[in-house]
Amino acid sequence: MAMLLRGDDGSEFELSLLEDPSLEGEEREGGLDPAGEDAPWTTISFRVATPNEEWAESAPCVNPFQVQNLLDWLEGVGSGKPEEADLELLEPELKFAVINDNGKSVTLRIGFHLDDRPEEFNVDAPTDAQFVDLKLTREQVRVAALELRRDLESRSENEMHLEEAPSREPVPGEPNDEAERGDELDDEIEGIVGR
């Protein structure tokens, strides 16, 4: 499932996480998480549509910690309390910023080209657009964050199954399987959208 942000003028930004098993350990630069452990990496795919043009890009070597930072930032924007006004993802070169905040709605600017970026990380998008602005309700941002959370949790579940993680006793109140967690996220999204 992809995260979709659709502005009031019909402009869209869609982001998907794709597993990339070819990216192993030492083959990638910066392959360690902050604790010094190997970090699983992924490919990120994004699509942008404006009234004038549409394009899509995929960029390998996205560290899930960056995706988690984006998720945390979107949740903060959705709740009206982001810790920072903007957030940059280095791989691919995306910058997210709140450029207008009207209480119930926000305008997000998603930039595609970061200044002074090393050439090996440039995304060669078939457009001259530097950014897209999306006027969104906070509810739309919260739904997008939930979609991204579901995608990230699904990837985590897949990695756990691949690693054959040892079983553990369920924690009271915690969903005990992926389907139950998915149902909870569906209910949460429906609750937000249905308001």
Image: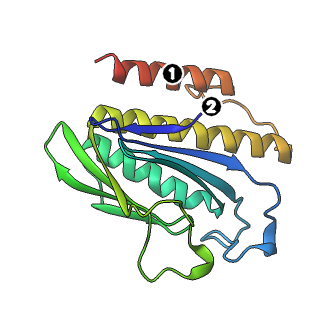
Query: Which quadrant is the N terminus positioned in?
Result: top right
Q: Callout 2: helix, strand or loop?
A: loop
Query: Which quadrant is the C terminus positioned in?
Result: top left
Residue occupying the point 68% across, 72% down: 32
Residue that label 1 marks: 186
Tag of residue 171: 2
- Crowding at dot 1, Cα within 10 Å, few <14 / some 14-19 / many 20+, comes out as some
In the image, residue 90 above or below residue 110 = below
Pick whichever, 106 or 179, lies toward us: 106
Q: Callout 1: helix, strand or loop?
A: helix
Residue 172 x, y percent position in the rendering = 59, 26
In the image, residue 172 above or below residue 64 = above
Residue 193 x, y percent position in the rendering = 35, 21
Label located before the other in sequence (1 or 2):
2
* 84 to the left or right of 37: left
Residue 176 sits in quarter: top right
Distance (Cα) linking label 1 and label 2: 21 Å
Pick whichever, 45 or 165, lies toward us: 45
Identity of the amino acid at label 2?
Val
Residue occupying the point 68% across, 44% down: 156
Of badges 1 and 2, nearer the viewer stands 1
- Crowding at dot 2, Cα within 10 Å, few <14 / some 14-19 / many 20+, comes out as few
Question: What is the residue that sits farthest to the left in this orientation?
Answer: 102
Identity of the amino acid at label 1?
Asp
Residue 64 sits in quarter: bottom right
Pick whichever, 95 or 55, lies toward us: 55
